[in-house]
């Protein structure tokens, strides 16, 4: 399934933040949970409407953003 089928942007949902389709859970929120050490299984148990594919889509979204952002150190 394509990333755009799992992560959507709708101005009517969470002020247009990217969310997991069919939820009001922002992709950034799921990423924060994982970044703080919660396991995939913990997240799935806490939010039973989510699937492993939803979590993987959030990670793919973060990867996409990291590739798009270009920041290069300025030599001293």
Image (cartoon, grey):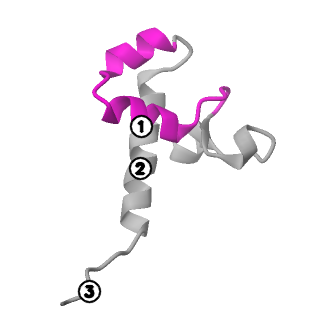
* Residue 74 numbered mark, or none: 3
Residue at the front extreme? 76
Residue 4 seen anywhere in this rendered image of the structure: yes
* Residue 31 numbered mark, or none: 1
Residue 2 x, y percent position in the rendering:
52, 44
Q: Quadrant of the C terminus?
A: bottom left
Residue 16 x, y percent position in the rendering:
71, 48
Query: Are discs 3 and 2 less than 8 Å apart at CB?
Result: no
Name the element at disc 1.
helix
Name the element at disc 3.
loop
Q: Which residue is more in the foreground, 2 or 38? A: 38
Numbered disc total: 3
* Residue at (45, 39) in percent of width and height: 58
Structural distance between the alpha carbons of marks 3 and 2? 24 Å
43 to 70, vertically: above or below: above
- How crowded pointer 3 is (Cα within 10 Å; few <14, some 14-19, many 20+) is rated as few
């Amino acid at each position: 399934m394509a990333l755009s089928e799992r992560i959507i942007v709708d101005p009517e949902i969470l002020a247009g933040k990217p969310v997991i389709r069919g939820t009001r859970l922002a992709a950034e929120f799921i990423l924060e949970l994982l970044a703080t050490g919660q396991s995939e299984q913990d997240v799935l148990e806490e939010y039973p409407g989510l699937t492993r594919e939803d979590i993987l889509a959030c990670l793919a979204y973060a990867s996409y953003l990291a590739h798009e952002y270009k920041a290069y150190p300025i030599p001293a």
